[in-house]
Image: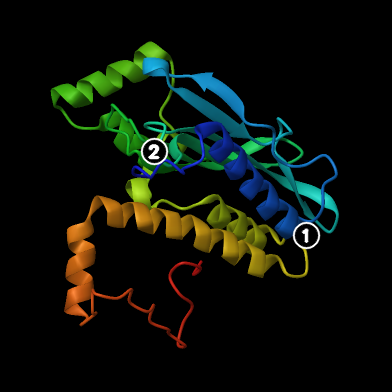
Amino acid sequence: MAGRPLTTPDVGQQATDFAQRIETLLQNVLGGNDDGYVAEPEGMSLRAGRTGYRITQRDARGVSLNSDGEKVAGLSFRFHCSCRNENSWLQIDKSVIMVTAEPEHVPLFHYDYNRGRTSETPGAHVNIFGSNDAATRIMLSCGKGLRSKSRRRKYINDGAFPTFSTLHFPVGGDRFRPGLEDVLQMTVYEFHIDLTDDWEKHLNQSRAEYRERQLKALVREYPDLAWDALTESGADLAERPERPHRSDRPGVLVKY
């Protein structure tokens, strides 16, 4: 999220607003919770005197996802956020979104993101907890080169047998990764969790806001591509162009 004028709220206010946005989403989709779903943002000290914030769910075991009144799954999330400088938008530096099976509290999958990755692991990826002997066989053999030998040595040194859950599936990088709304809607369709009557409207509104922010950040990063797309479509850049309306399918900002 690129620089903004001096009217941009400070990092603490932006972190509070972000936490409230998640709280509103969960309240509107899952129903009221008197204690709230999201904990107060927790400050973190970063390099060069910068301040960041950690935002997570209030219950350490995750937000309760119920089906016919019985807890069947848990939704956990953790976002590490900061601003590059005092006049910039809040950005997510790291995040984890995890769904667990309850009451055993067994992980099913988690979406991870690390803006400053320093390894071969994709910055945005998903880990799926399951068994796949063929995948394990490939990870154990993993070629004959130096990098492959180092990987096998790491398995031995860590005492960890490679499993399907250690595979990192890329999911779109910085700007195209799924949001919390997508993971929540997956649990709606696959686990048939209990919902409010107008859950889909509120979820789509929140997803559109998330994707609008990502799209604006992408345009700020690649203004040449935005200019190319607009001029190719015949837009008059002297005026703000109107957004095209499509009646044949939902817009990409809300489409699941």
The x and y percentages for residue 24 are: 69, 52
Would you call the spot at circle 1 few (<14 residues within 10 Å), some (14-19), or many (20 or more)? some
Tell me the element at label 1. loop
Furthest toward the top, the residue is 157
Q: Amino acid at mark 1?
A: Asp
Quadrant of res 98: top right
The x and y percentages for residue 185 are: 60, 60
The reply to whether residue 7 is visible in this rendering is yes
The reply to whether residue 99 is visible in this rendering is no
Quadrant of res 50: top left
Above or below 250: residue 107: above
- Horizontal placement of 74 versus 243: left or right? right
The x and y percentages for residue 225 are: 19, 62
How far separated are the C-alphas under marks 1 and 2? 31 Å
Residue identified by numbered label 1:
194
- Horizontal placement of 130 versus 113: left or right? right
Q: Amino acid at mark 2?
A: Leu
Q: Nearer the viewer, mark 1 or mark 2?
A: 1
Above or below 51: residue 186: below
Give me the disc on residue 167: 2
Quadrant the N terminus occupies: top left
Quadrant of res 202: bottom right
